[in-house]
Image: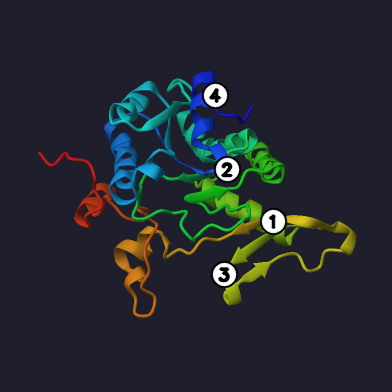
Amino acid sequence: MFFLRFSAEDVALLRPLASNGEPLLVAWTTGGKKYTTLALNLAQSVRANVGPELEQRFVCIALDQEAQELMQRHNFHSVLHEVSRSNNLDDAIWKLRWMALYTFAHLGINSLVLDSDRVALSSPFAKRMRHEDHCNTGCIYVKASKHVEQFLLNYLQENNESMIAGIQRDWFDQKVFGRFVERHVFRMEGDQVHVVYGTGDQEQVHRNLEAKAGDRVQRPLRIRVLDPVVFAHGMNYFYMRAHLAPGRETQVATAHANGVNDKNYFLRDRGLWYIDDFD
């Protein structure tokens, strides 16, 4: 029910790209210039700033043939999960990132799923990913396992309906996911999900310390919150310039054009537009 509808040819494309456990870098878009240009700009930023090794593992999930044809015309990998506009397109988009993560986990493919209004400034995998299951909204990496697959399935099943008892589901899927994680960390009897902040000596683990010994598991699901300066959101990158702060200078992996309007203006103004359309 929650698997993306990839063709056999698309699955045959994905598996070699993810051979030897190499993770895929994934974005998604529907048709229409407003959306496809952002996805294409992300793809071009991978090509310009990271290089062919990661470009070969970049895949765009197209929700219609128009978007797929655009990505393929520019020689980027694209797979099709077609969504009819006569159906509830908003609901399909709300679930898409979670269905993508769930589908890749089921296929045994590690995947980093990005919003299409991000740009890649360096490899997001170099020295930044640890051997755990990672989830971070807007930029989410999942190391495929049955544990994380079940966790994502539970989330999708719980939030499948866009309206319950006449109450509209929160439009912000990332906020809903945050509440889902919080409940599993602090409001369940068990100790099966841990949230991790920081690394090394600065690492902080949030877990249910009140859980009884019998309710704990040997290998809990670990969800690490990625550094918001390295995986920058719009406020940190475009306004605060947090990566340039004294004593904090760091190479940014991805910058997210969220919280800024107009997105295209900010991306162009900061030199993060990689499409040659300045006619």
Q: Which mark is residue 162?
A: none
In three-dimensional space, the C-alpha distance between marks 1 and 4, rounded to whole angstroms, equals 30 Å
The residue closer to the viewer here, 272 or 200, is 200
The residue closer to the viewer here, 220 or 2, is 220
Query: Could one spot residue 110 in this view of the protein?
Result: no
In three-dimensional space, the C-alpha distance between marks 1 and 3, rounded to whole angstroms, equals 24 Å
Depth-wise, is mark 4 or mark 3 nearer the camera?
3
In three-dimensional space, the C-alpha distance between marks 4 and 3, rounded to whole angstroms, equals 37 Å
Using the rendered view, name the quadrant where residue 200 is placed. Answer: bottom right
Query: From the image, which quarter does the C terminus lie in?
Result: top left
Q: Amino acid at mark 2?
A: Gly
Query: Would residue 206 appear left or right of 127 to someone viewing this image?
Result: right
What residue does disc 2 label?
Answer: 21
What residue does disc 3 label?
Answer: 199
Residue 199 % position (x, y): 57, 69
Q: Earlier in the sequence, mark 4 or mark 2?
A: 4
Secondary structure state at the residue bearing disc 4: loop
Q: Residue at x 39, y 75 (%)?
A: 248
Q: Earlier in the sequence, mark 1 or mark 3?
A: 1
What residue does disc 4 label?
Answer: 5
Q: Earlier in the sequence, mark 1 or mark 4?
A: 4
Q: Amino acid at mark 1?
A: Arg
Q: Above or below — where is 148 with respect to 182?
A: above
In three-dimensional space, the C-alpha distance between marks 1 and 2, rounded to whole angstroms, equals 31 Å
Secondary structure state at the residue bearing disc 1: helix
Check if mark 4's residue and mark 2's residue have beta carbons within 8 Å. Answer: no
